[in-house]
Amino acid sequence: MDQHAESPRTRYITTASAVFAQKGYHAASLAGIADRLGVTKQALLHFFGSKARLYEEVLSALSDRLLRSIENVEGTTPETKLRTFFLQLSEDALCNVEDTQLVARALLDAQTTSENWPMKPFLDALGALAHKTKRWSKASDAELFCWIYRHIGSIQHFAISQTTLKGMYGKEAFDVLKETHQAQLRAALADLEKDPV
């Protein structure tokens, strides 16, 4: 879709996502986002009221995209769906580093009172799907979320490191690293049909 055909609100969220991913919440400014958009700071305030509300909208949009990716994942069993989701997340993270950076920045910027964190619905849906697998059906929430975070963390760390890895080792070596990372992720997800932990 042509960015100019989008509603102003959608365009503002898209641009703000890029700025927040690059700078984080604290370093980003409404004036800087407005400047990048070619609008006034007041235009942003008209739609969102504050930088905090805009940031919440950005994270909600990201959470919605991730939630849709869980809901739309192909597979006939929870195990297949969960495996497919993580493998697709890994591929998507490499192609759309901005979303990956945004999640990392959001985690770093989170306040100590994050009960209403916009990413929670995504994480809850992922946890619910994992609880349906044979392997994790009887696991505690703590065990399950540590397992989920380990995989998400590995995927995100690898994705946001790709520029550095290519710079240090070259594109060919990075391509081997990418294949190895995917193979290790597939191996880690291979036990979803095993008896519960």
Image (cartoon, grey):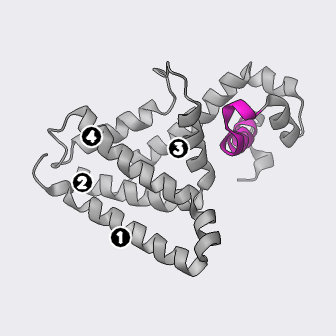
Among the two numbered marks 3 and 1 on one chain, the one whose residue lies closer to the N terminus: 3
Q: Which residue is mark 1?
A: 183
Q: Amino acid at mark 4?
A: Leu
Check if mark 4's residue and mark 1's residue have beta carbons within 8 Å: no
Closer to us: 116 or 84: 116
Tag 1 secondary structure: helix
| Residue lying at the far front of the rendered structure | 168
Q: For the residue carrying disc 4, how many other residues have a C-alpha within 10 Å: few (<14), some (14-19), or many (20+)? A: many
Tag 3 secondary structure: helix
Determine the main secondary structure of the stretch shown in magenta.
helix
| Residue 98 in view in this figure | yes
Q: Which residue is mark 3?
A: 65
Decide whether residue 132 is among the magenta residues: no
In this rendering, the answer to whether 94 lies above or below 178 is above
Measured in 3D between alpha carbons, the distance from the residue under mark 2 to the one under mark 3, in whole angstroms, is 21 Å
Q: Which residue is mark 2?
A: 79
Which is more foreground, mark 4 or mark 3? 4
Q: Which residue is mark 4?
A: 144
Q: Is residue 78 left or right of residue 118?
A: left
Residue shown at 43% from the left, 54% from the top: 154
Q: Position of residue 151 (x, y in %)?
A: 37, 51
Measured in 3D between alpha carbons, the distance from the residue under mark 4 to the one under mark 2, in whole angstroms, is 14 Å
Q: For the residue carrying disc 2, how many other residues have a C-alpha within 10 Å: few (<14), some (14-19), or many (20+)? A: many
Tag 4 secondary structure: helix
Residue shown at 39% from the left, 60% from the top: 87
Closer to us: 24 or 120: 24
Measured in 3D between alpha carbons, the distance from the residue under mark 4 to the one under mark 1, in whole angstroms, is 22 Å
Q: Which residues are magenta?
A: 9-28
| Residue 76 in view in this figure | no
The answer to which image quadrant residue 48 occupies is top right
Q: Amino acid at mark 1?
A: Ala
